[in-house]
Image (spheres, grey):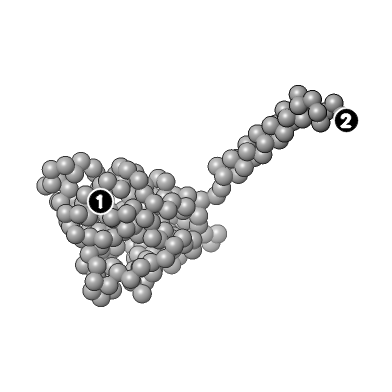
Amino acid sequence: MHRILSGGGVLFPLLAMVLVLGAGISGCSWRNKAPPEAGYERGGVPNLRGERVLLLPPQLVRGAHADLERELVYALEGRGGPVEWIGPDAIRRRVASTPGMRFDPDGLPVQRFLSGELQRVGDPLFGALYRLAAVEDAAYAVIPVMARDREEDDGSHVVELGVALIHTRTGRVYWYGIVEGDAGPAGALPATVSAVEALARRLLR
């Protein structure tokens, strides 16, 4: 017993092994953490009244109706209130006509949002949003990060939207949430519309 405590050649390697194993277990649990599901929210939605807001094109789309983008614009603009939306088509035109804006608004690097834990965006996404917002005088950006179809036990389908609200001057992610619509047939427009309307209600209360 005395040799173990005083020799250093046995105790310290054992302690090191315990620490390494603990770190490995912790790392595995982090990597295996399930992605957030419908109803998840992180952060809060600021008051957007009187703001100019960038509405980027939907990014990672799997299963929603082909008219998702059009319905997003219609739902957000249709809620009324003093919010000026700069929509996807206007953003595409601005990027195409402005020297120095070398990014694809339809292919933004948004994969890190899928964990639901991103607190601040960095480059290249931040740089793209910052330059675009400076030209458009917009303080916030809404990015429809993903749209996906979820099949229910009864065979109906639900559209989920994962959306980020970002402060364009700091890169802070004010809010990230996953909203869902009503169940319906796979690929049906009403299922997508109901998800978009749920998002509009959440952003523009």
- Name which residue lies at 88% across and 30% down: 1
- Name which residue lies at 18% across and 50% down: 92
Where disc 2 sits, the SS reads loop
Q: Amino acid at mark 2?
A: Met
Which numbered circle lies on residue 37? none
Using residue 82 as the reference point, say whether residue 43 is left or right of it. Answer: right
From where the camera sits, is residue 145 visible?
yes
Using residue 31 as the reference point, say whether residue 181 is left or right of it. Answer: left
Who is closer to the viewer here, 106 or 191?
106
Residue 67 location (% of width, % of height): 28, 58
Q: Which mark sits nearer the N-terminus, 2 or 1?
A: 2
Who is closer to the viewer here, 112 or 11?
11
Q: Is residue 168 above or below residue 128?
A: below
Camera-side mark, 2 or 1: 2
Residue 159 location (% of width, % of height): 42, 59
> Extreme front residue here?
6
The residue carrying pointer 1 sits among few (fewer than 14), some (14 to 19) or many (20 or more) residues within 10 Å by Cα, namely: many
Who is closer to the viewer here, 12 or 115?
12
Q: Amino acid at mark 1?
A: Tyr
- Name which residue lies at 39% across and 51% down: 120
**Residue under circle 1?**
130
Which numbered circle lies on residue 1? 2
Residue 33 location (% of width, % of height): 56, 47
